[in-house]
Each structure stands twice: as structure tokens, then as C-alpha cells.
Amino acid sequence: MALSQRYGRERHRIADRERIRYRSYELAKRLYERFLEEYGTASCRGIQEKIMGRSYDLWDPKEMEAFEAAGGHDRVSPEVVGKAARWVAEMILEEDSK
């Protein structure tokens, strides 16, 4: 969202004759590729499997409890989200320095 907010088109210019939106598409693809490089996937399920050895059905109360017990929200999610935030910040700094 941060990449789109910073580099996407504005609502009053939705026609995007300048093709501004494609810059945010390129950056989103780079972010996606970072996930693939780091985790082999960009899906939550796949990332859980990579880091935790299995995925959890977070709609199921027992599975949610197991996810929590395995450090899902205390360790794993903050680590993954923190990396993603850092990657986006790095991309923004890189783009703004061009």
C-alpha cells in the first residue's frame, strides 16, 4: 500500500495518461520477488510452512491456539512484516534518490 500511495496514480487522474501506475506495479513486483527470494513464496500459508514447518488454519480456534503457541504472533508474524516494511522503506529511499 505504501508503494502505491507514494508512486501510484491519483484519483483525480484515474485515466493515467502518463502511465504513472506502472511504476508502482514495477515496485510491487520487486517486493514480490523479495518474498520469493526470502521465503520461496509470497503466501501466508507458504511462509508459515517455510518458517514454522507447517501452515495453520487461523479460522479454526484450535489451529489458532497452536499458531499462537508456536510463536506465530509473538515472533513469526512480526519478523515477516518487519522485513517487508524494511524492504519497502529501502525501495522508497532508493526511488527517491534517483
Image: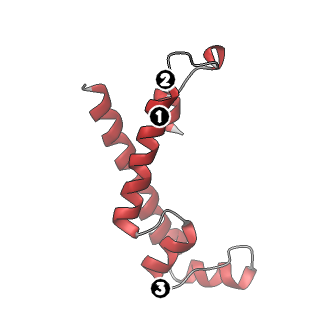
Q: Which mark is residue 96?
A: none
Q: Earlier in the sequence, mark 1 or mark 3?
A: 1
Residue depicted at x 50% and y 22%:
19
Amino acid marked by disc 2? Ile
Q: Position of residue 38 (x, y in %)?
A: 35, 65
Q: Position of residue 42 (x, y in %)?
A: 49, 62
Mark 1 touches mark 2? (CB < 8 Å): yes
Depth order, front residue of 86/17: 17
* Residue 36 horizontal side relative to residue 56, left or right: left
- Looking at the rendered image, the disc whose residue lies closer to the viewer, 1 or 3, is 1
Instruction: Give the CA distance from mark 3 to mark 2.
Output: 40 Å
Instruction: Give the CA distance from mark 1 to mark 3.
Output: 33 Å
Q: Position of residue 11 (x, y in %)?
A: 65, 20
Q: Which residue is mark 1?
A: 24
Label 2 crowd bin: few (<14), some (14–19), many (20+), radius 10 Å: some
Amino acid marked by disc 3? Gly
Instruction: Give the CA distance from mark 1 to mark 2.
Output: 8 Å
Label 3 crowd bin: few (<14), some (14–19), many (20+), radius 10 Å: few
Q: Which residue is mark 2?
A: 20
Q: Which residue is mark 3?
A: 53
